[in-house]
Image (tube, helix red, strand yellow):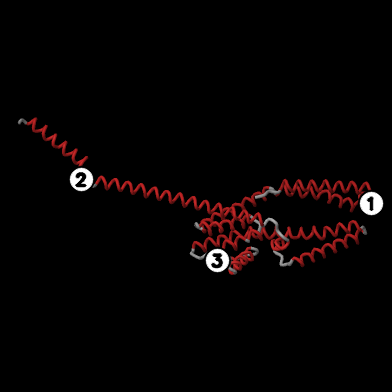
Amino acid sequence: MDTRSILIVLLAVAACAGAFYVLIFPFLTGEAKAEKRHAHVVAKGTGRRGDHRAADAATRRKQVSESLKELEQRNAEKNRIGIETRIARAGLNLTRLNFFLAAGCAATVTALALLGLSGSPLLALGGLIIGGLGLPNFALGFLTRRRLKKFAQEFPNSIDIIIRGVRAGLPLGDCLRVIAAEAGEPVRSEFRRIVEAQTLGLSAAEAVERMPQRIPTPEANFFAIVVAIQQKAGGNLAEALANLSRVLRERKKMRDKVKAISSEAKASAMIIGSLPIVVAALVYLTSPHYIELLWITDTGRIVLGVCAVVMGIGIFIMQKMIAFDI
């Protein structure tokens, strides 16, 4: 046998050995079955993990959606507020009877004052209506707006206290007690009511849920929604409240910016609205007989009434033009 034939035989043997090692040897040792089983287990585990993640995300979205629907339904049921709620929003420590007594006294004083000044029973009747209905409602609205403004200024600082306490490991109830003891009014009194409600057995979400009824502001409503969702769906309360605090501070910055930009328009509206009254007062001081025709003659009274209506409409339109809802 020559050298060429030997090389051909060796190459054939090497090729058969390589084919045996690649194609048949893994089946004999079980490596192919092991690799197949490993790939099957990995694919099955990945699929299960993905299914679990998708199921958890769907469950969480469902819980959040249900929580928002419940809060919307409860807020819709609480839209009808009574006189007790209005008194509480104004921060007054009055009962329903005391409020009606104060309104009756205001109506009597206003009617007697107009009757003494004009001697007209019709004006006295108008003063009775204005003093009994207009003045109490105006006072409640003014006190409520002032209280809500103070609450909006102090509330972000209280949320920061909760964030720092939760990140330090304190429970939510202890953070609420700190705010109820050290925050400024009216935040302190509102959180004191929350702590008292928890003492009576309510959960934190149920106690906080009552705050937007007494403080009808977006800030209080956002806080109640965040706490309710965290109690039901879980999650990082400190991170959620941090985002809420940032949003509230940005809202305050935007509100102050709008107030600064619209200050010129508000000043112009005040000047335009007060100019006829100021001019009439100056004319009366200089020439009283010239301007008194407006209220001693029938034609003057009609002109004065029409002017008052037109001025009221103009002031209302200007107020709507310069009022911005943030």
> 151 above or below 28?
below
- Count of numbered circles on the image: 3
The local secondary structure at tag 1 comes to helix
Q: Earlier in the sequence, mark 2 or mark 3?
A: 2
Q: Which residue is drawn at 32% across and 46% down?
A: 39
Q: On the image, numbered disc 1 is attached to which residue?
A: 296
> Percent x, y for residue 111?
87, 61
- Comparing labels 1 and 2, the label whose residue is closer to the camera: 2
Question: Residue 313 versus residue 79: which sits nearer the camera?
Answer: 79
Amino acid on which the number 2 mark rests in the picture: Leu
SS category of the residue bearing label 3: helix
Marks 1/2: CA–CA distance: 122 Å
Rendered image quadrant of residue 3: top left
Secondary element at image label 2: helix
Where residue 129 appears, as percent x and y from the top left, is 84, 58
- Which one is closest to the eye, mark 2 or mark 3? 2
Q: Residue 216, image x and y in percent?
A: 66, 57
Q: Residue furthest left?
A: 1
The residue that disc 2 covers is 28
Q: Name the residue under label 3.
A: 173
